[in-house]
Amino acid sequence: MNADFAPTVVTPRFTIRLSATPRGARLARRLAAERLHSWGWPYDTEAHHTATLLVAELATNAALHGRVSGRDFRLRLTLHPADPALRIEVTDTRPDRRPPAPGHLPSPSPESDSGRGLVLVEALSTHWGTTSGDAYTKTVWCEVALG
């Protein structure tokens, strides 16, 4: 083998645009579940359940709170096999509606039917946050350990 040869490390990625609707959010979870299974994290593992729950929460938030009529949201999954960890990114078209910063989420009311999604994201992920790459979108992301 040539000493100058360095093997290329491929980072598995999956990206798709989905309608910012409840149906799009459900599809995001199903597609993430299939992708994780194909990457070696079977449907019946705790890591798979946790990762797909996080995708569902972020996609639902994009459909409910980040929705602009006629615009989609983007789901991006990046697998870091060496750790192993999964980065989940959901980008929507409402940069003006940013969630509270990590560690500053209000406690949900016991009487409320909503307000628990990001609490779950904060509890189940290793870390999470929000970024804005331009004036038209925001991305809510989290990372989850798979090993």
Image (cartoon, rainbow, N blue to C red):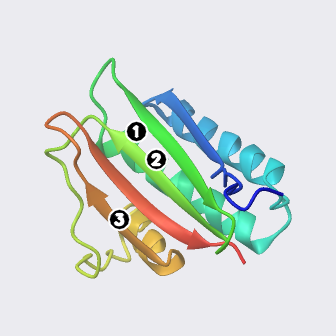
Residue under label 1, please give it. Answer: 63
Residues under numbered marks 3 and 2 in contact, where contact means CB atoms less than 8 Å apart: no
State left or right for residue 80 relative to residue 136: right
- Above or below, 53 against 144 in this view is above
Numbered badge on residue 115: 3
Position of residue 144 measured from the top left corner of the image (x, y, whole percent): 56, 71
Q: Secondary structure at mark 2?
A: helix
Q: Earlier in the sequence, mark 3 or mark 2?
A: 2
Q: Residues within 10 Å of mark 3 (few under 14, many from 20)?
A: some
Residues under numbered marks 1 and 2 in contact, where contact means CB atoms less than 8 Å apart: yes
Residue 105 location, quadrant: bottom left
Q: Nearer the viewer, residue 137 or 71?
A: 137
In this rendering, which labeled residue sits more in front, label 1 or label 3? 1
Q: Earlier in the sequence, mark 1 or mark 3?
A: 1
Q: Residues within 10 Å of mark 2 (few under 14, many from 20)?
A: many
- Above or below, 28 against 111 in this view is above
Q: Secondary structure at mark 1?
A: helix
Q: Residue at x 27, y 28 (%)?
A: 68
Position of residue 44 measured from the top left corner of the image (x, y, whole percent): 86, 64
State left or right for residue 52 relative to residue 48: left
Q: Residue at x 72, y 70 (%)?
A: 47
Q: Residue at x 48, y 72 (%)?
A: 120
- Above or below, 14 against 83 in this view is above
Q: Residues within 10 Å of mark 1 (few under 14, many from 20)?
A: many
Residue under label 2, please give it. Answer: 60
Q: Residue at x 33, y 17 (%)?
A: 70
